[in-house]
Image (spheres, rainbow, N blue to C red):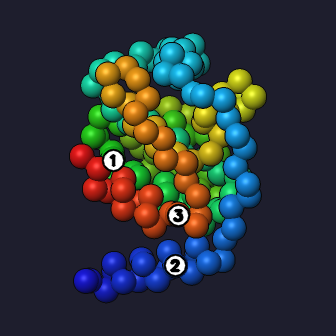
Amino acid sequence: MTKIKLLFINILAITIIACSTPKQKEYKYIEYEHIETYFNKIHNFELDNSIDKIVVIAEGNGCGNCNKIFAEKTLEELEGKNTVFLVTATGNYVNIKPFLNLEKDCFFDWELNKNQYPEFENSRVIYLKNNNIDTIIIMQSELLFEQLEYIEHRK
């Protein structure tokens, strides 16, 4: 294992121990059509069958360091791989500069209506399959390492 990976694992372990995630809100069942409507209405963008992941980059909820790590890792692992990024983070805690430089499939919503679109309130990856939601991984500090491993290895 390289020194960089060991350093990353140590930083991640310290971050997880130091952070605590507030109790997650319970959401109603999230429908693909609701997400599709959001992108069409707010961003004038049509989701199509080629898109199989939506990554939400948020801040202000849960662990700030965890959101930073999540943003960096998901950008590194998923950019250009049939992924749409939705950045609700303003840059106060999470570095959004790399997202500002993306040429396509990256949208910003700094005034997200969290009551109307609670599915975009926290950092997460929404996996899509055949115009349906397949899997949702909501970033949680106590599970961050396992979640990042899953994202990295999912085909």
Residue 20, which numbered label? Answer: none
The kind of residue tagged 2 is Ala
Q: Is residue 64 visible?
A: yes
The numbered dot on residue 143 is: 3
Q: Position of residue 105 (x, y in %)?
A: 39, 31
Q: Is residue 50 above or below residue 88?
A: above
Residue neighbourhood size for the residue with mark 1, other residues' Cα within 10 Å, grouped as few (<14), some (14–19), many (≥20):
some
The residue positioned 73% from the left and 54% from the top of the image is 23
Q: Position of residue 24 (x, y in %)?
A: 70, 49
- Element under disc 1: helix
Instruction: For residue 73, say whether it is visible.
Output: no
**Residue drawn at (43%, 64%), measured in percent from left and top?**
146
Camera-side residue: 27 or 43?
Answer: 27
Type of amino acid under label 1: Leu
Residue designated by label 1: 78
Q: Is residue 80 left or right of residue 122?
A: left
Cβ–Cβ under 8 Å for marks 1 and 3: no
Q: Which residue matches tag 2? A: 13
Give the x, y percent position of residue 52: 33, 32
Task: Please tell me whether mark 3 sits on a helix, a strand or a loop.
Answer: helix
Question: In the drawing, does residue 91 fall left or right of residue 8?
Answer: right
